[in-house]
Image (cartoon, rainbow, N blue to C red):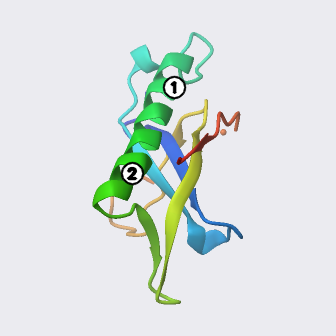
Amino acid sequence: MPADAAICASYRGVPPVTARKRGRIYLGPCRQGALTTTGLILESSQVTIQQSCKRLAEKTQSVGRWVIASRKYNQISSVVSGFVDEHFDTQRRRDPGTQFFGRRPDEWTAA
């Protein structure tokens, strides 16, 4: 498994959803034990991460907000939903000097 392979939790801000109202959390490196024999992320791993993201969105409401910040437009958007893909992903880094350079969404919604 490549060192830059990771499970990706994607999340979105309040609609209308634009590129500046989306974000991702990369969890990795991905180990063989996290994958099915066909190379997909185990459903149990997807569910665990999805539930954790939902709890994070709900818990932060009592102490603050989980938000997506747009520096360009000087705006913030509360995170309201997301999903965990069954395919591993890679984080594309913008720094060319760094070493490392597939959706069946089970969507969650913050209460």
Tell me the number on the disc at residue 82: none
Measured as percent of width and height from the top left, residue 43 is found at: 56, 19
Measured as percent of width and height from the top left, residue 111 is found at: 53, 47
Q: Which residue is at the front of the view, 11 or 8?
A: 11
Residue hosting label 1: 47
Name the residue furthest left: 63
Binning the other alpha carbons within 10 Å of mark 2 as few (below 14), some (14 to 19) or many (20 upward) gives some
Which residue is at 48% across, 57% downward? 92
Q: Is mark 2 on a helix, strand or loop?
A: loop
Q: Quadrant of residue 19?
A: bottom right
Identified by mark 1, the residue type is: Val
Relative to 92, residue 87 above or below? above
Residue hosting label 2: 100
Q: Distance between the residues labelled 2 and 1?
A: 27 Å
Q: Is residue 35 visible?
A: no
Measured as percent of width and height from the top left, residue 83 is found at: 59, 41
Disc with the residue nearer the chain's start (2 vs 1):
1
Q: Quadrant of residue 88?
A: top right
Identified by mark 2, the residue type is: Phe
Measured as percent of width and height from the top left, residue 36 is found at: 55, 13
Q: Is mark 1 on a helix, strand or loop?
A: helix
Which residue is at 44% across, 85% downward? 71
Q: Can residue 31 be seen in this view?
A: yes
Q: Which residue is at the front of the view, 37 or 48?
A: 48
Relative to 39, residue 74 above or below? below
Which residue is at 33% across, 66% downward? 97
Which residue is at 35% across, 35% downward? 29
